[in-house]
Amino acid sequence: MTARRHGPLLASRRSIGREQAPPPGGTVARTVQKAIDTGEAISVGAVNLVKNTARAAISGARDVGAEAGSAAVAAVRGSIAAAREIGGDIGRISGRVVNGTFGSVRRLETI
């Protein structure tokens, strides 16, 4: 039987800042650990890819929305300008019609 140690147990005897020694174990344990580390790296890369793609899509949608808004504002402004011009034309024509009507009435009064 071995003697029990009294006092604190040390978790590791390696110095801070030194390269960590490979964990004790066989080839299978190292291979499994390497596969896990590789899987973690791939999953982090996939998450970053999805995140960056989502950001780009949102930015593109925002740009398209801004362009659509600008086009809508331009269309409304163009419609207002056209309505104003049409209204002016109608006003000028109606003025001429009224003047022509009064002119005809004056000519009829002289008969």
Image (spheres, helix red, strand yellow):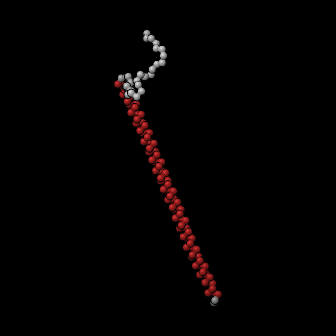
With respect to residue 68, does 32 lie above or below? above
Q: Quadrant of residue 47?
A: top left
Residue farthest along the top direction in this orientation: 1
- Quarter of the image with the N terminus is top left
Q: Position of residue 24 (x, y in %)?
A: 38, 22
x 60%, y 80%: residue: 99
- Quarter of the image with the C terminus is bottom right
With respect to residue 46, does 5 lie above or below? above
Residue farthest along the bottom direction in this orientation: 111
x 46%, y 19%: residue: 9
Q: Position of residue 66 (x, y in %)?
A: 50, 54
Q: Position of residue 96 (x, y in %)?
A: 58, 79
Q: Is residue 32 visible?
A: no
Q: Position of residue 35 (x, y in %)?
A: 38, 31
x 42%, y 34%: residue: 40
- Horizontal side of 81 relative to 33 (left or right) equals right
With respect to residue 111, does 22 lie above or below? above
Q: Is residue 103 visible?
A: yes
With respect to residue 59, does 16 lie above or below? above
Residue in front for this viewpoint, 111 or 49: 49
- Horizontal side of 109 relative to 55 (left or right) equals right
Q: Quadrant of residue 17?
A: top left
Residue farthest along the right direction in this orientation: 109
x 44%, y 45%: residue: 53
Q: How many marks?
A: 0
